[in-house]
Image (tube, rainbow, N blue to C red):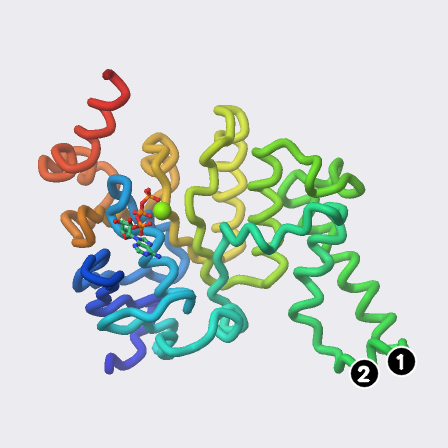
Amino acid sequence: MTAPQSGVALAVEGLSIRFGGLLAVEDLTFEVMEGEVLSLIGPNGAGKTSAFNAITGYIEPAAGEVLYRGKRLTGLKPNQIAELGVVRTFQKTSVFSGRTVLDNILMGLHLRSKQHPLAIILGLPAVAREEKTLKQEAWRILEFTGLRPRADEMAGSLPYGELRLLEVAIALAANPKLLLLDEPVSGMNPTETTDFMKTLARIRDLGITVLLVEHDMKMVMGVSDRVVVLNQGRIIANGPPAAIQLDSEVIRAYLGERYARAEG
Ligand SMILES: Nc1ncnc2c1ncn2[C@@H]1O[C@H](COP(=O)(O)OP(=O)(O)OP(=O)(O)O)[C@@H](O)[C@H]1O
Ligand SMILES: [Mg+2]
C-alpha cells in the first residue's frame, strides 16, 4: 500500500486486466496529479476503456490497485466510487432520452440529495427548500455547458454533439473531483469540438482534475498537461504533449498508424 501523497489525485498501480486468454492491460502504473488534465491515448484496442472500467469499478482487475487521494477504490462499486468524487462519462444509460434536458440534470443532482426518501415522499419543508436549490444548481450547470437553450427539449431529440455534452453535464451534476471522459468529442463536428475544449478548460478552472481518453490529437495536444500512451495494454510513453509528439516509439505505434490510415 502506498501512503497518500499530497498532490496525487489518482494512483494506478500495477493494474492488469484479463478477458479470458487476452491480457488487455498489463502492469499499468501512472498517477494523475490534483488539478491536471491527463490524457490516456493509444491505438484502438490498446486498453484505454478497459482501464477506465477498472478504475471506476465496472470490472475487476486481475492484478493491481487504484487509489484516489490515498483511498483504495479497487473492490468498491461504481456508485461508491462516484460518491468519493470519481465520476465518469460515457454511460449512455445516464441519459434518459424520454425526459427533458433539465430533468436529466435534476435526476443527476437528486442522486446526491441529502434527504431521506421518506422525507421526499412526505414532502417535508426541507425537501421543498432543497428542491429549489437543486433547480438553481441545474440551471447553473446548463448555463455552464451551454445547454440552457435546450433545457425543455427531450434529451432524445438532441443532435449527437449536444447529447455528448449532456453526458458531461450529468457527470458534473454528480459533483466530481476527478472526471473521467472517454472520447467526449467523438462524433462532434469541428466547431463543437473547439467549444468543448473551452468547456474543458473551464471545468479545469473549477478545480476538477480530468483524466481524458481521446483520439482527436488536436484536442489532446491542446488541453493536456501530460499524456500517457498505451500500446497493446502497456505504457510506451508518459510526458508533456510536446515530448510525446516527438517520441519515435509513439509515432511508430500510434501517430504513424493513424496518419497512415488518414492518408490511405
Ligand atoms: N468485455 C470484453 N470482453 C472481451 N474482450 C474485451 C472486452 N472489453 C475489451 N476487450 C478487449 O480488450 C482490448 C482492449 O479494449 P479496450 O476497449 O479497452 O480498448 P480501447 O483502447 O478503449 O480502444 P478504442 O480506442 O477502440 O476505444 C481489445 O482487444 C478488446 O477487444
Ligand atoms: Mg475505448
How far from the left and from the top, in percent, is residue 198? 51, 37
| Rendered image: mark on residue 122 | 1
**Is the residue 40 above or below the residue 260 in the image?**
below
Query: What's the CA distance linking mark 2 and mark 1?
Result: 6 Å
Q: Are marks 2 and 1 in contact (CB under 8 Å)?
A: yes
Residue 254: quarter of image: top left
Within 10 Å of the Cα at label 1, are there few (<14), some (14-19), or many (20+) other Cα atoms? few
Give left or right: position of 145 versus 188.
Answer: right
Q: Residue at x 63, y 31 (%)?
A: 159
Residue at the spot of label 2: 118
Q: Residue at x 41, y 57 (%)?
A: 35
Residue 247: quarter of image: top left
How far from the left and from the top, in percent, is residue 136? 78, 57
Classify the position of the C terminus by image quarter.
top left
Q: Nearer the viewer, residue 145 or 5?
A: 145
Please identify the residue farthest to the top as the structure is shown: 263
Q: Nearer the viewer, residue 104 or 69?
A: 104
Q: Residue at x 56, y 41 (%)?
A: 164
